[in-house]
Amino acid sequence: MRPLGEAQRDVLGAVPDLPLADVSLAEALGLVLATPVVAPSDVPPFANSAMDGYAVVAQDTQTPPVTLQVLEDVPAGSVAQTSVRPGFAIKIMTGAPVPSGADAIVRVEDTEPGNDSVVVNATVAVGTSVRPAGGDVVTGETVFEPGVRLTPPHVAVLASLGLPSIPVRRRPTVALMSTGDEVRRPDTMSLEPGQIRDSNRPLLAGLLAELGADVIDLGIIEDDEAVLRDTVEKAASVADVIFTSGGVSMGEYDLVKIVLRDLGTIDFWQVAMQPAKPFAFGHIEGTPLFGLPGNPVSVMVAFEQFARPALLHMMGAGQIFRPRVAGTMDEPIATDPAKTVFARVAIESTWEGFIVKRSGGQNSNILSALARADGFAVVPVGVGELQVGDPVELEMFRWPEGRTITQALGAEVFSSVTQNG
């Protein structure tokens, strides 16, 4: 069996970069920056008030209470027509430009407004409640580096910069299919003996949507060599990546293996991991293909360990692996010492750290335990059994990616992937 890290390295080294594109702000969420973003102007572009109140000369407030004459009222979106000088103030709303001459803002709660005057009941220092120009971002500053995957806060920062377009690697298009005569649509009400509903495509479609990929759903492909061949060839012509599920084990009727070997350069691996030991990877007419197992939990584990990092790597992301944290077992788990095992676990966060229990049965067909899980307990090769109180590494598949190639697989792997990928 192939070691898991070796298989991950080979996959990452064999997938291509996606093409560069300039997209609008509305299209940028979830994509990865391809070049640095340099601020074309200050944010905010002018000094403005952080409070509703009065723009004053701070020195006037040193012996409160003090009465100041009010020159005018400046709401947000307006600019003062006069300057503040000692003995005077300008009423101002949050976000409005600070008038010239003023060096502090007194909040309205610390004042007693009159007709043309205001009584200030608090002392303020120079700069109080003033947001300086460039206080967030300065002109010429590199705001984000390439490889950053854009979240809503990133998009908000880009919006504040007024950029006409965002340089990214474009969104991947993934062709998705399930295989097997026994597989039926999820909405099938009544099953014949030997039939199962397709849970793999909905699972993968959701994982891909979460990742930001565009999905071409090719449906359920029967165990017919000609139909499967035509479908795979069509997928290679329209997609950046192909996903199949099922038909990659050692069975006599696994036609996927036959067709893929005929059409492309595909390796079928027995990876030293559980679940998801059977796995296929290669290319059909230059398009990467991931041949995932048939059991749904195996599909999820294979997606997380191979497909998700590879797609993010193709998109140019720096962090491509889910984060891992330390936890403590609250019940024993027996595993196969010859494999890296991904146990599905419920994780309780306490003051003492993360406490870990199985989320249900650990067979690769038990989806309900996966749905109840907060992450994987990663049991390395050679361990075999965890007891109560033992430390365990947790892969948090509900958290955003948080590890680079180097952090996950080592410096030598990063060098190899950079040269080949």
Image (cartoon, rainbow, N blue to C red):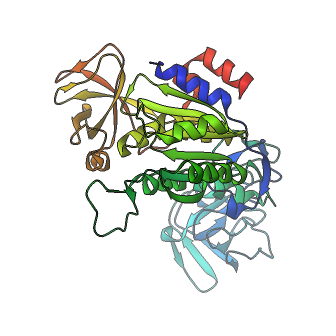
Name the one closer to the observer, 395 or 308.
308
Would you place residue 388 above or below residue 62 in this image? above
Q: Which image quarter holds the C terminus?
A: top right
Name the one closer to the observer, 289 or 406.
289
Q: Is residue 397 left or right of residue 383?
A: right
Place of residue 20 in the rendered image (x, y in percent of width and height, measured from the top left):
79, 47
Residue 129 shows in the view = yes
Residue 31 shows in the view = no
- Which residue is drawn at the image coordinates 29% and 15% (left, top)? 383
Place of residue 335 in the rendered image (x, y in percent of width and height, measured from the top left):
26, 23
Residue 48, picture quadrant = bottom right
Q: Residue lying furthest bottom in this view?
A: 115
Place of residue 119 in the rendered image (x, y in percent of width and height, measured from the top left):
55, 73
Name the one closer to the observer, 103 or 167.
167
Would you place residue 287 above or below residue 239 in this image? above
Q: Is residue 391 left or right of residue 112?
A: left
Place of residue 23 in the rendered image (x, y in percent of width and height, measured from the top left):
76, 58
Residue 38, picture quadrant = top right
Would you place residue 58 above or below residue 244 in this image? below
- Which residue is drawn at the image coordinates 42% and 51% (left, top)? 200
